[in-house]
Image (tube, coloured by chain):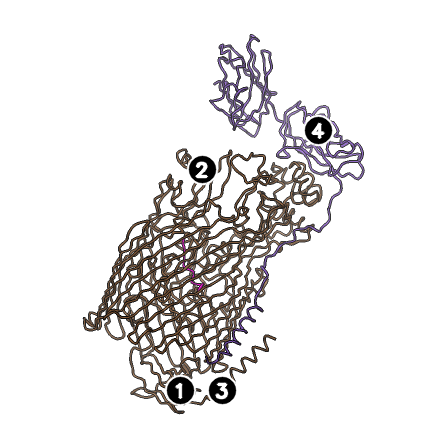
Chain colours: A brown, B purple
């Protein structure tokens, strides 16, 4: 029924558009003759064509429509349709350069004029042809030196993809919306993934259909924009379209050899997304308001195989037969002897253990021969018990892959001119709500510490982490002229919150009375930034001189909210919370004598002692001078002073220059200092668990930077990271060949980088005393612990040519980089980063990435072929071992095609990763955790979901 | 607004599509927690010894209980028969190498016990070979008794007016005094104790328990602190016997033994403290 309704609507819209259309013909030429391959588009639609070899074109349009004519190397031209024949002459110029907002406070600066490298990504063009629909996905496949991939089995990080620019951290790139600072996520990544210890900006909370373009400034810009802009700046420019409704219906799935289960093949990761964008004019002076809504439903993927780890022990066999209580009360010798007598295969396990001199508990917990494909002697205890229970190893698979996600986003962007003098009120903001569901490690009954809670759940369980992510933002401001000065006064507020609900789990210390779901707490982060920017352009000074200055005041708040009691507490056999006075005999222990861990399995909730509610404020002032000394020579400088109420002040500056040797060749260079303020999350986040040793509560986990233990270990208060950036490059054009080049080399040195340390414990009597004084046994911290040296080269080549009846655009971008960790500080005589942590920074992301995209537009067709080369990466888990592991370079191919069914209806179909390429598998079976992590969970060049096939319908209505 | 009706229809479509695509399932696979399969047992008699492993270290002429159990209560008195052999498969001779008593599980009970005593050093295998119960299976599991030489520590002194008691400990703690008042310090385990009222005491320890550093602590029961001569004799079963003079002037750790495990057994070095 839905389908019929859809078809009826399509027919209705199509018919309405046929009326009043006519065929327009003409010739496009320059002063020398006709121009083949020139683009002709009906403005505000997707209707377009290109001129043939004789410069002739034919297009459907009606009187009053505006035709846009463009070709590389020429100034674009717009002509209103009157009549059926429209001949146009184009004039040569430096047309088709994008005007950018980022990188310069002088308005109207273009990409090619910029003294620093900037990429401009037309999001609608990319999103209309490619499979990628979120901001991170688009940038990962399109922007050079930008890397982002989904994580798995990593709690909240499953739903916020850590992103990196130029190999630096997710927190070392500043994100702006319409030139205003975007707030960060409330989540600090503390799991073993790329970006561990950092707080990034959640760009996936912004619907891509609300975005006109994304500007990526690949250079340090802290002197202009403040904290975080060490690797660069990403500016997301929102749409302003009016009187046009664009509706995208997007559907796809992973159809891959490993879909649903490793090596089985099938379909998973189904995705359905619907986006709508509509705008109306406001007032009569060019004002507008544009709305975007987006709904997304994304299924999970799973690339694990059958569970290869031990699933049952002899205890489970006894418990099934005799009842849990009776089995629990059997001494190990009796239990082992009793179970062994049930079946010869079990007796063989018993006898083997006795011959080895194993303890009874070891015999009970053993699984006989290991399950490594040796079908002649599989794990006898597990195999026996699976058969008895009518289960298979597939019933115990973990979920390794993309998490399930459902969400809705809404965004508004508006400007309202107040007068003819340019005074304008503007605002933009929105709300996004996402509901993610990821899974943790399967709690198999074979866990000897009782976390599987066999008494309540004899077959164990797969706990899930449900994350609710809410993002809200509103920016409002007024800009205009005061005298000759351009003034912009604005306030931007944004907040992000994470709430964790742990589902399908237990608190094992509560046994059969445990709830199955827990509210585990969460985080929130709020930021309010007030900006005053003033600038003036002196046309007659040099060849143009722009002076800008301004101020900023920012307030931030970070909260860590505790979970419900049962999510974090350990209970004794009487159901009372374990304290220092709880007798050892009252502790809940497993059959194997281990104290059963408390809290919600997979994600113990945050405790009241961990709660945080902290604020910080900062103020800044800047001056920015930009002079076209001559038509060919641009010089710019910026200075910024910023003061934070917690760590003090910082002063940064930048000097950039560009020299145009000709219209087609220019050299640019820049040097700047930068900084990144430690995030409130890094200063105050703490998550500790309590154990009682001899009646004394002992803490272990992540301790806040201002905790007593940190002070006893003389860990200094967090301060800002500082950086020095140097870049040198050139831009070149060969208009006759339709070629544009940019090559930029860079060196970025970061000092006092903030990171999450390895776990530390007491190593001698002196340190033991320190830990005892803090009632702690093992601890991690955030600290300014190391330096980074980062260098590389980015290359971008663009080419456009006429081909047949259409236009072929070829874009090649490449990045080659190297990151080195240096000057690692020590705590208790040990470096704060172990080899694994260094590996996440230095070589878990590709140091080489090449992207070749070929797009061919011809009449109603538009075809895109993209090949992305991802360089090799090393697995951090094996770094520093006798067997380091490298996952080889891969090429991932995307292919898609779109066709204009009607003037306002386009259909697109295609595939991301057409040839179903996967990263190399983890080479050691022992490291795959029983065939679960076949692909590394620590590093991934491009994810491991395999081929993604999609279809899209795009409606455009006026 | 132009096309307002079209917009309303599209939003309706949007809402309908969202509902259609909405997946309420949490996609949580909950493996069946209830076990539907039947039990796979007949009643069986099995060993119910409360030891850490099937390897049980013991000495000669020490009574070792053979605890047995059945899954459910037995309807009649049931005799359980044990067999004993050397672990390498050779026969052991009852009366020469060992003596064994059948296990008995009384009517209405699940548990019972027999016993075995070994006369010679060696590795023995004890198994259940029979029972006179109805439909009662025997576990094929075995117990391995590793019969090792023992070491006897004995002290003797002239005057029974003085009372000295022996505690054989697996470690050292210089703060230990007045053990009957203060107790054994946490972290130390008593391997042997002798606390009579005569002028002699003796403890026998398995040689395997003397691997590493172990200590003899002597408690001056009446705190006489009289500097009395005591003779300590260390006698290894079927081996050497050595005397050591000790002067008892206070509660003290009097003697240290360092045992080293070798292929042929445990060797010892001694030190008077």
Disc number lying in front (4 or 2): 2
Same-chain status of marks 1 and 3 = yes
Quadrant of residue A766 in the image?
top left
Q: Give the magenta range.
A: A198-205
Q: Which residue is mark 1?
A: A64
Location of residue B83 in the rendering, given as x and y in whole percent from the top left corner: 73, 31
Same-chain status of marks 3 and 2 = yes
Spatial CA distance of label 4 from label 3 is 106 Å
Q: Quadrant of the N terminus of chain A?
A: bottom right
Q: Chain of mark 3?
A: A
Q: Are marks 4 and 2 in contact (CB under 8 Å)?
A: no
Residue B92: assigned label? 4
Question: N-terminal of the two: label 1 or label 3?
Answer: 3
Q: Secondary structure at mark 4?
A: loop
Same-chain status of marks 4 and 2 = no
Question: N-terminal of the two: label 1 or label 2?
Answer: 1
Residue A731, magenta (yes or no): no
Disc number lying in front (1 or 3): 1
Q: Which residue is mark 2?
A: A775
| Left or right of A888, for residue A750 | left
Mark 1: few/some/many CA within 10 Å (<14, 14-19, 20+): few
Q: Residue at x 55, y 59 (%)?
A: A303
Residue A203, magenta (yes or no): yes
Q: Chain of mark 2?
A: A
Q: Chain of mark 4?
A: B
Question: N-terminal of the two: label 3 or label 2?
Answer: 3
Spatial CA distance of label 1 from label 4 is 113 Å
Q: Quadrant of the C terminus of chain A?
A: bottom left
Q: Are marks 1 and 3 in contact (CB under 8 Å)?
A: no
Q: Residue at x 18, y 71 (%)?
A: A541
């Amino acid at each position: 029924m839905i389908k019929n309704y859809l078809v009826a609507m399509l027919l209705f819209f199509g018919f309405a558009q046929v009326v009043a259309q006519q065929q327009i013909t003409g010739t496009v030429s320059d002063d020398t003759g006709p121009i083949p391959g020139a683009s002709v588009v009906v403005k505000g639609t997707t209707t377009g064509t290109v001129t043939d070899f004789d410069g002739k074109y034919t297009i459907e349009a009606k009187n009053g429509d505006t035709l846009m004519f463009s070709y590389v190397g020429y100034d674009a031209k717009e002509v209103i349709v009157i009549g059926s024949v429209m001949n146009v002459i184009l004039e040569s110029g430096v047309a088709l350069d994008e005007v950018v907002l980022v990188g310069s406070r002088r308005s109207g600066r273009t990409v090619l004029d910029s003294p620093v490298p900037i990429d401009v990504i037309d999001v609608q063009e990319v999103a209309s042809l490619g499979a990628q629909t979120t901001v991170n996905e688009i940038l990962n496949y399109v922007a050079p030196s930008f890397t982002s991939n989904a994580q798995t089995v990593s709690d909240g990080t499953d739903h916020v993809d850590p992103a990196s620019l130029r190999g630096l951290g997710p927190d070392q790139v500043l994100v702006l919306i319409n030139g205003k600072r975007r707030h960060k996520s409330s989540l600090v990544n503390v799991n073993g993934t790329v970006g561990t210890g950092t707080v990034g900006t959640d760009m996936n909370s912004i619907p891509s259909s609300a975005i006109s373009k994304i500007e990526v400034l690949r250079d340090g810009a802290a002197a202009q924009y403040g904290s975080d802009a060490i690797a660069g700046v990403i500016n997301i420019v929102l749409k302003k379209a009016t009187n046009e409704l664009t509706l995208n219906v997007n559907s796809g799935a992973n159809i891959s050899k490993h879909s649903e289960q490793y090596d089985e093949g099938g379909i998973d990761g189904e995705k359905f997304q619907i986006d709508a964008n509509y705008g109306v004019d406001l007032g009569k002076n060019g004002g507008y308001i544009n709305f975007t809504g987006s709904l997304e439903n994304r299924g999970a993927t799973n690339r694990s195989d059958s569970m290869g780890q031990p699933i049952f022990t002899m205890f489970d066999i006894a418990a099934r037969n005799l009842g849990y209580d009776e089995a629990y009360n059997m001494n190990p010798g009796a239990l082992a002897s009793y179970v062994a007598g049930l079946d010869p295969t079990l007796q063989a396990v018993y006898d083997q253990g006795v011959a080895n001199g194993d303890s009874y508990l070891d015999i009970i917990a053993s699984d006989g021969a290991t399950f490594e494909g040796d079908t002649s002697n599989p794990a006898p205890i597990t195999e026996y018990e699976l058969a008895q229970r009518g289960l298979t190893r597939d019933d115990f698979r973990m979920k390794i892959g993309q998490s399930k996600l459902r969400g809705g986003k809404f965004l508004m962007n508006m400007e309202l001119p107040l007068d003819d003098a340019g005074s304008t009120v503007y605002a933009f903001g929105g709300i996004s709500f996402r509901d993610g569901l990821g899974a943790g490690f399967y709690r198999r009954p074979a866990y000897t510490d009782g976390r599987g809670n066999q008494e309540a759940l004899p077959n164990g369980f797969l706990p899930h982490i449900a994350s609710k992510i809410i993002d809200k933002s509103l920016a409002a401001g007024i800009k205009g002229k005061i005298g000759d000065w351009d003034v912009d006064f604005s306030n931007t507020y944004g907040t992000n919150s994470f709430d964790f609900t742990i589902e399908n789990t237990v608190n094992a210390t509560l046994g059969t009375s445990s709830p199955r779901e827990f509210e585990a707490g969460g985080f929130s982060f709020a930021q309010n930034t007030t900006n005053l920017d003033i600038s003036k352009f002196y046309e007659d000074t040099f060849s143009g001189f722009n002076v800008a200055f301004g101020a900023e005041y920012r307030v931030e708040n970070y909260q860590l909210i505790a979970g419900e009691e049962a999510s974090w507490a350990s209970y004794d056999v009487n159901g009372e919370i374990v304290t220092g006075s709880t007798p050892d005999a009252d502790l809940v222990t497993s059959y194997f004598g281990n104290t059963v861990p408390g809290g919600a399995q997979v994600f113990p909730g945050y405790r009241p002692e961990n709660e945080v509610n902290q604020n910080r404020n900062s103020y800044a002032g800047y001056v920015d001078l930009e002079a076209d000394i001559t038509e060919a020579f641009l010089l710019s400088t910026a200075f910024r002073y910023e003061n934070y109420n917690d760590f003090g002040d910082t002063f940064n500056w930048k000097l950039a220059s560009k020299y145009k040797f000709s219209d087609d060749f220019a050299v640019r260079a820049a040097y700047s200092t930068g900084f990144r303020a430690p995030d409130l999350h890094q200063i105050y986040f703490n998550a500790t668990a309590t154990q009682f040793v001899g009646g004394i509560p002992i803490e272990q986990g992540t301790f806040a930077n201002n905790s007593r233990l940190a002070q006893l270990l003389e860990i200094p208060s967090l301060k800002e990271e500082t950086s020095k950036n140097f870049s040198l490059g050139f831009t070149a054009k060969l208009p006759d060949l339709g070629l544009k080049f940019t090559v930029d080399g860079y060196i970025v040195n970061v000092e006092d980088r903030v990171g999450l340390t390895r776990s530390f414990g007491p190593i001698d009597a002196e340190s033991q005393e320190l830990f005892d004084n803090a009632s702690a046994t093992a601890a991690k911290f955030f600290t300014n612990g190391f330096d980074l040296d980062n260098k590389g080269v980015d290359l971008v080549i663009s080419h456009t040519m006429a081909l047949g009846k259409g236009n072929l655009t070829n874009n090649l971008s490449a990045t080659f980089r190297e990151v080195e960790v240096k000057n690692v500080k020590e705590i208790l005589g040990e470096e704060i980063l172990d080899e694994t942590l260094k590996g996440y920074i230095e070589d878990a992301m590709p140091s080489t990435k090449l992207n070749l995209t070929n797009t061919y537009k011809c009449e109603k067709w538009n075809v895109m072929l993209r090949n992305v080369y991802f360089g090799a990466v090393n697995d951090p888990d094996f770094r520093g071992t006798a067997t380091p592991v490298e996952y080889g370079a891969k090429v991932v191919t995307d292919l898609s095609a779109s066709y204009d069914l009607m003037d306002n209806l386009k259909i697109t179909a295609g595939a991301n990763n057409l040839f179903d390429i996967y990263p190399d598998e983890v080479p050691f079976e022992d490291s795959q955790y029983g065939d679960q992590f076949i692909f590394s969970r620590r590093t991934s060049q491009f994810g491991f979901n395999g081929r993604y096939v999609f279809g899209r319908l795009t409606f455009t209505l006026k | 607004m132009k096309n307002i009706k079209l917009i309303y229809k599209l939003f309706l479509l949007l809402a309908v599509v969202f509902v259609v695509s909405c997946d309420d399932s949490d996609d949580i696979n909950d493996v069946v927690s209830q076990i539907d399969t039947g039990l796979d047992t007949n009643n069986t008699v099995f060993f119910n010894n409360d030891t850490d492993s099937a390897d049980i270290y013991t000495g000669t002429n020490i009574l070792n209980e053979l605890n047995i159990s059945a899954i459910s209560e037995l309807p009649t008195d049931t005799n359980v028969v044990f067999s004993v052999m050397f672990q390498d498969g050779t026969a052991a001779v009852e009366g020469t190498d060992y003596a064994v008593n059948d296990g008995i599980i009384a009517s209405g009970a699940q548990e019972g016990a027999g016993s075995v005593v070994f006369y010679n050093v060696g590795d023995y295998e004890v198994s259940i070979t029979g029972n006179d119960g109805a439909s009662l299976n025997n576990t094929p599991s075995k117990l391995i008794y590793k019969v090792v030489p023992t070491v006897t520590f004995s002290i003797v002194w002239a005057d029974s007016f003085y009372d000295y008691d022996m505690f054989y400990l697996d470690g050292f703690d210089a703060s230990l005094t007045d053990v009957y008042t203060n107790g054994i310090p946490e972290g130390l385990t008593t391997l042997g104790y002798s606390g009579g009222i005569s002028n002699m005491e003796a403890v026998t320890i398995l040689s395997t328990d003397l691997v590493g550093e172990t200590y003899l602590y002597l408690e001056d029961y009446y705190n006489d602190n009289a500097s009395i001569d005591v003779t300590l004799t260390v006698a290894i079963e079927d081996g050497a016997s050595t005397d050591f003079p000790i002067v008892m002037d206070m509660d003290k750790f009097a003697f240290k033994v360092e045992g080293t495990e070798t292929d042929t057994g445990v060797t010892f070095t001694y030190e008077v403290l």
